[in-house]
Image (cartoon, rainbow, N blue to C red):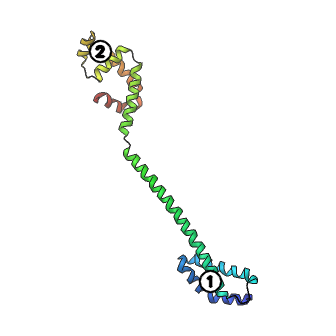
Amino acid sequence: MNFSLSDFNRFFLEYQQRFIHFAITYVHDEAVAEDVVIESMMYYWENKEHLATDTNIPAYVLTAIKHKCIDYLRHRQLHQEVSDEISSLYAWELSNRILSLEEFEPNEIFTREIQELVDETLSTLPERTRHIFIMSRYENKSHKEIAELLGITAKGVEFHISKATKALRLALKDYLPTALLFFYFH
């Protein structure tokens, strides 16, 4: 049975709400259900010439709606799976960033950088100046003890420590507040 345009319009008006209700049952979105029904009706209209004359038109359109709903739901399912995968990857990456940040110790890195600059600067100093500075700051020897050990005056010890301190102050100018803590508490 082929419909004329007026027959199709009557059919459309008679079945539209039932078909939309059927589609909403599965797609859970009224706008999508309406689109599915209209597309299915149009599919029938465009292919009506190729159908057998005894075709049950409401069943034919409902079958088209069924397949369009299945396609929509499969697409949503795939979208959800991809979204879940992305969410899972994001959660994993976020967890790694949190863990990395929790394990990060700025003091260790900052102290290591300062220590490297101190070591580098000390290596550029004359041997005697470096030795006196190390005895004073690392071995906690007094100026008097260093003077006695090296057979020089306390003023000579002060001169070498002052020379090393100036060189270090220049090398550590960007780290000065932390460097001061380093020198006074080491």
Residue 85 relative to residue 161: left or right: right
Could you tell me which quadrant the N terminus lies in?
Answer: bottom right
Could you tell me which quadrant the C terminus lies in?
Answer: top left
Q: Secondary structure at mark 1?
A: helix
Q: Which circle's residue, 2 or 1, is located before the other in the chain?
A: 1
Q: Secondary structure at mark 2?
A: helix
x, y percentage for residue 40? 65, 79
- Residue 53 seen: yes
- Residue 12 seen: no
**Residue flagged by tag 1: what amino acid is it?**
Leu
* Depth order, front residue of 54/128: 54
Residue 118 relative to residue 151: left or right: right
Q: CA distance from mark 2 to mark 1?
A: 100 Å
x, y percentage for residue 71? 60, 72
Observer-side mark, 2 or 1, equals: 1
* Depth order, front residue of 78/161: 78
Q: Is residue 60 above or below residue 116?
A: below
**Residue flagged by tag 2: what amino acid is it?**
Val
Residue 15 relative to residue 177: left or right: right
At horizontal 55% and vertical 69% (from top left) the residue drawn is 76
How many tags in the picture? Answer: 2
Q: Which residue is mark 1?
A: 62
Q: Which residue is mark 2?
A: 157
Q: Is residue 177 above or below residue 146?
A: below
Q: Is residue 121 above or below residue 27?
A: above
